[in-house]
Image (cartoon, grey):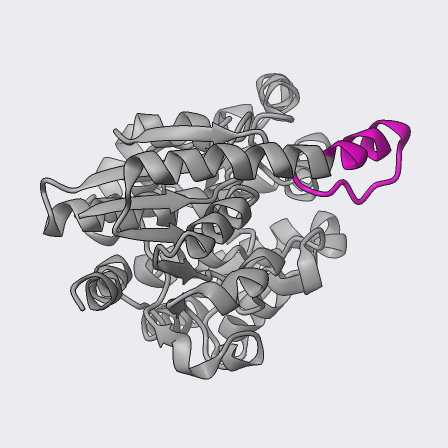
Amino acid sequence: MKAIISGGGTGGHIFPAIAIANAIKKRYPDAEILFVGAEGRMEMDKVPAAGYKIIGLPIAGLQRKLTLGNIIKNLQLPFKMIRSRSKVKKVIRDFQPDIVVGVGGFASEPTLKAAASMGYPTLLQEQNSYAGLTNKMLAQGARTICVAYDGMERFFPKNKIVFTGNPVRAEIEDSTTTREEGRSHFGLNADSRVILIVGGSLGARSINEMMLRLLNNDNTLEQNNIQVIWQTGNTMFETADKAVKDAVCGNNIKVHKFIARMDMAYAAADIIVSRAGAIAISELCIVGKPVILIPSPNVAEDHQTKNAMALVDKGAAIMVRDAECGDKGIAAAVNLLNDKEQQNAMIQNIKLLARHKAADRIVDEIDKITLK
């Protein structure tokens, strides 16, 4: 088995890509797997850290905010696309893959278009309830499209759609980490109640500002015997770290730029406050903890709100809108911590939505294509 996996930009694309690669390797130990990503994006670090080779393309996305710098970047895009397609055609020709898998993100468009034009079979993995522009453009040339939500025939040919669920990191899906081990890992008190706050792999400004506001204004955490694990992302880590050190309740907060051991973080938490990216939601369903979702407004077609509502409508999550999280986010978390009956109901409901072994199901579909 020789597979190229392409895409990235955020953890929501990278982690399922790595999960698919790991599932291929589990089934075919001698498989050769090559990743194709975008130069300067986080996949160029995360993929090698997971043990796989990656080649970067000089590709970038359209800059929607019209500044002089962004206009110049947008004018460079056609040239970057031409260079990327030329480079990836050589990569494909040299590697000779049995399958090319696209998970969304800048690099997957030139990679899968090139593969399809050269006669190599392609498979798409769409994480969200609202299909991304890249995957919609690539659907015509794909043999199979693996999805995680019902109703995706709105975007893709019905005969190509297979409901597999979203691939989740094995260390989370197969985790046996206990609450005590998680709390010890983060240096938390065993008898405190714990909130895990994550804004996605790149962080979330509004969620970070919600926490900074909490540090400046009151002693809610101390009064309610609450400790917090807070992932900030790169941009606001230094500001957050200083604010925590200066705050009266700083000892109640463990601040991290990026949490490598999310299995430990999930195990330690009583409730979770999170963005509503598709992979985050898939992980949360498997973890089975009460969750408050704060969808990002800065995504295509407001798809994170649609992702969140898929849980809210089933009594499996609470949603707080991004614009309101500064006023309502922490209060909602504290109220949920104090309502054991609601927590229990949410735990039961969210576990019903878990889709296990999605990566293995995707490899089943790869087999159907490559073993014909």
Q: Position of residue 14 (x, y in %)?
A: 42, 42
Q: How many marks?
A: 0
Tell me: residue 209, above or below residue 237.
Answer: below
Seen from the viewer's position, the closer of residues 21 and 177 is 21
| Residue 195 in sight from this viewpoint | no
Q: Is residue 175 left or right of residue 219?
A: left
Q: Quadrant of residue 268?
A: top left
Q: Quadrant of residue 318?
A: bottom right
Q: Position of residue 179 (x, y in %)?
A: 26, 45
Q: Is residue 240 left or right of residue 24?
A: right
65 in the magenta segment:
yes
Q: Is residue 364 left or right of residue 168?
A: left
Tell me: residue 244, above or below residue 360.
Answer: above
190 in the magenta segment:
no
Residue at the spot x=50%, y=52% of the render?
A: 113
Q: Pick the quarter of the image with the C terminus.
A: bottom left
| Residue 73 in sight from this viewpoint | yes
Q: Quadrant of residue 34?
A: top left
Residue at the spot x=69%, y=64% of the render?
A: 301
Residue at the spot x=61%, y=18% of the render?
A: 238
Residue at the spot x=62%, y=17% of the render?
A: 242
Tell me: residue 158, above or below residue 239.
Answer: below
Give the residues drawn in magenta, as a range. 59-76
Q: Position of residue 42 (x, y in %)?
A: 49, 31
Seen from the viewer's position, the closer of residues 162 and 372 is 372
Seen from the viewer's position, the closer of residues 82 and 160 is 82
Q: Is residue 248 left or right of residue 326?
A: left
